[in-house]
Amino acid sequence: MELLIPYEVTPRRDTGVNNAKLGIWLFLASEVMLFGGLFAAYIFLRMGADAWPGMETFDTHEMATRADQVLSVPLATLNTVILIASSVTMVLSWASLKMDNFKGFRLHMGLTILLALGFLVVKAFEYGSKFSHHVGPDTNIFLGIYFVLTGLHALHVTGGIIVNAYFWGPGTRMWLSGNERDKAHFTNRIEIAGLYWHFVDLVWIFLFPMIYLV
Amino acid sequence: MATKDDHAGSHEGHHVGFWRKYWFSTDHKVIGIQYGITALFFLLFGFILMLLMRWQLASPGVEIPLLGALTPEMYNQFGAMHGTIMVFMGIVPLAVGAFGNYVVPLQIGAIDMAFPRLNMASYHFFFWGGIVMLASFFVPQGAAKAGWTSYPPLADIETMGQTMWLWGMVLLITSSLLGAINFLTTIIQLRTEGMTFFRMPFFVWTQFVTAFLLLLAFPPLEAAGFLQLADRLLGTSFFLPSGLVTAEGPLEVSGGGSPLLWQHLFWFLAHPEVYVLILPAMGIVAEIVANNTRKPLWGYRLMVYSLIFLGFMSFIVWAHHMFITGMGTAISAFFQVTTMIISIPSVVILSALFITLWGGSIRFSTPMLFALGFLPMFGIGGLTGLPLGLAPTDIPLHDTYYVIGHFHYVVAPGTILALFAGIYYWFPKMTGRTLNDTLGKVHFWGTIISMNGIFFPMLIQGLAGVSRRLFDGGLAYSFSEPVLEYNMVMSVSAAALFLFQFPFIINFFMSMKGGKKVEKANHWDATTLEWSATPIMPVPHGNFETVPRVYRDPYEYNVPGSDQPYLSQDLAPPPATRAEALEKVEA
Amino acid sequence: MAEAMTVSDVKKHVRVYLIVFGSLLLLTLVTVAVSYFDMPLGPALAVALVIAMVKGSLVALYFMHLKGEKRVIMWVLAFAAAFLIGMFVLFIASLLDQEMVAVLLRVT
Ligand code: HEM
Ligand SMILES: [Cu+2]
């Protein structure tokens, strides 16, 4: 027997939010601390390092003086644009539901998923080019933190793809049932999934300059 | 109770199968009991590891029946796993997972946790995390040896058990994070009508603050865990400095990392973690003290404010564990000051509990005995901690048995006594039967006396300079000679402690089926909702026949002017004053 | 707020989303362009961080609807932010302090 938990869909009067909304923000708060811990580690290691990035460039074999001599800024910029675009399509998919436009939802959610996949493909090229130069996470601290931070972020992207794909496909059952409460519930779920997805975007917005640009 | 149709499977109904009912249950009470039983098992296991180590310490090299003599490798494994198991798989799951899960929704008048399926998931993450930890004993070269703190560089280059430890921790951390999200959402969203924040029982408050600590302190350790995994599996050197040489020669890594980084990230969690270990215990004791002195808690609001302040401060004291790492004097001064400040709210809470006893007509029930035992024991634990918070005294004491004695006073005769108190107190609620009092009293006196026999000598040995984590208990050092004989005292006490758990174990299982049935639902004449608003025992799924409404503060015992001995939180005031009470709630 | 929105409200929102999208793209270009100026680390870091924070705030305020969000959620984030900043500050402070010790040891 499953119980009907209060405030699953409708907000509670004094707090003004429903359970899932509060839950996801609590989760995101913990994610802030997770990536915060990694950023703190990055700062700690970088401040303690003798040189940054502390490795030779691939073409001239001189000591690199800037991160962008060993990382590909164009690819990363492309990925930034892709991720930002996917954030917009995500929020538009939610807005479509709000306007009772299911087709629009399908379209925008589908785009979000495709863009996210595109992000991973670009990432794979980026990693691949490092490996082809025979460098990897074990080369030095700089590449180590680069791989771990971007890798963990890519895992978050993958998680987002799975969640979004579920809501694009089988998860739509809830909306299609046509029942108003279920439709509201589904719209909430998309908002929740969106909050997670925007957070993934937000992390990248800080990762990108910290690792590639400065 | 209303049921929901969209998730319920087709074959669900009144005949829920065994697995569904006891293993994949979404009922917070069942999950609480799952947590409780699993955690008690782990506690016993961790304790037995330590018994074997104490055998070795009392009589180095003498063979243990069936097992043979302990090797140094085994000693290190047992020590590291004892710490890990006790902290992450014993105390926290029992204090938060078991008591929190079982009691919090009942006390705030909620029909379940906010996310029942997430709740189930967090138990299963905990369970499998525990299994991974136990399984690590069977991998080549055995379990983790680098201590429960898993300090690199050692932890980076030690055997495979270390990797298992990290994966186990990732699962346990995930479990705690899911749990924390659930507790916070439940307490914020599912308080019943009239249950304002300042009408919540103190136990709920402790769980609330604890959940915040878990939520925000665990992720940095998870981050650190990922970095250590990368060091071990991907060949990075986040925690390995350049030029490291081991017995096998120079280490072939790129280097450039910092072992101190791990310590910072680890203690960023692990200091709040000690409050995770102690706050729920304080909450349990507060409930029992109020109930058995038949008085409201003295300074309830003061206690709550102290609790919140304590929660905040616990995030900025962590480096008092690192005074000997050669940190600068300015930063060391900062952490000494914050450490001295954080001792104040703990003292406030403890004092408030002592003052509550004053002038009460105390009922010396078994739970109350354990709660009363907690007070001075936690006091000793806290006071012995002060010298460790100041660098000049910490530097000689660090890594001696003094530290071991100090924190065991906090967690063993402190927290564990409180958890036993909770078991004796809520057992009637969980089963509808009481635990036997005589066995309970034997258990109490045996436990508290033998615990002091174990841990007090540790303080003395530590002051004499005996290091912790020594395989021979200090035999090889001449300066430890005068205090060496205490090793036998401690080990015999530990064996006694083991024996004194049997009255409890027997009591627990016998009473489950054959204990005295409680005569009324509100067995202890308590005011909080878990007793007053749930007439059926054991409490069914969904908790309440009608969801209670709250009209009063949590501990209205012997209220002046009232002819009742106690007023339950859901006891409606007479109609004349009801309008007034309603207004108070709205405001 | 999100619960009681009408279709025309949402349409207004959509316009805002597109404006934010444009700003984010622009800021991305700026931050990349600035990085090619080869500034010293200090100023480069400052510029990059400021731009990242502006971009992050745009995402949080508009896409994540933090603008006008309920108090509980603000509290949760305030706690996380406080502890996060505390962590950064103390990590950096402990390193700087240690470096000073190292300098002193070298001098004496
Ligand atoms: C009640 C029976 C217990 C006994 C007899 C006991 C005994 C000991 C002893 C003798 C040590 C030092 C080992 C060494 O330095 O070689 C130790 C370490 C430790 N104990 Fe316990 N303990 C008990 C309960 C607990 C509990 C309840 C906790 C829970 C929080 C705990 C946590 C730890 C930790 C974290 C360490 C440090 C392990 C390490 O060095 O890595 N112990 N214990
Ligand atoms: Cu501490």
Image (spheres, coloured by chain):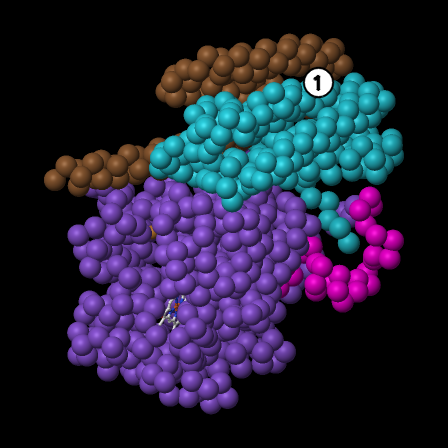
Chain colours: A cyan, B purple, C brown
Q: Residue furthest front?
A: A60
Image side of residue A75 versus residue A114, left or right: left
Where, by quadrant of the figure, is residue B485 drawn? bottom left
Please name the residue shown 26% across and 79% down the image. B475
- Dot 1: element: loop
Where in the figure is residue B6, as x and y percent of width and height? 82, 44
- Residues in magenta? B5-34
Where is C3 relative to B379, above or below? above
Where is B150 relative to A26, above or below? below
Q: Is residue B22 part of the magenta span, yes or no?
A: yes
Q: Nearer the viewer, residue B69 or B542?
A: B69
Where, by quadrant of the figure, is residue B398 drawn? bottom left
Q: Chain of mark 1?
A: C
Please name the residue shown 41% across and 49% down the image. B240
Q: Does any portion of residue B543 appear in the rendered image?
A: no
- Specify the quarter for ligand 1: bottom left
Q: Does any portion of residue B353 appear in the rendered image?
A: yes
Residue type pointed to by label 1 = Met
Image side of residue C10 versus residue B186, left or right: right
- The residue tagged 1 is C5
Where in the figure is residue C75, as x and y percent of width and height? 48, 31
Q: Nearer the viewer, residue C58 or B296?
A: C58
Please name the residue shown 49% across and 30% down the image. A61
Image side of residue C61 versus residue B503, left or right: right
Q: Nearer the viewer, residue B501 or B371?
A: B501
Please name the residue shown 34% across and 68% down the image. B469
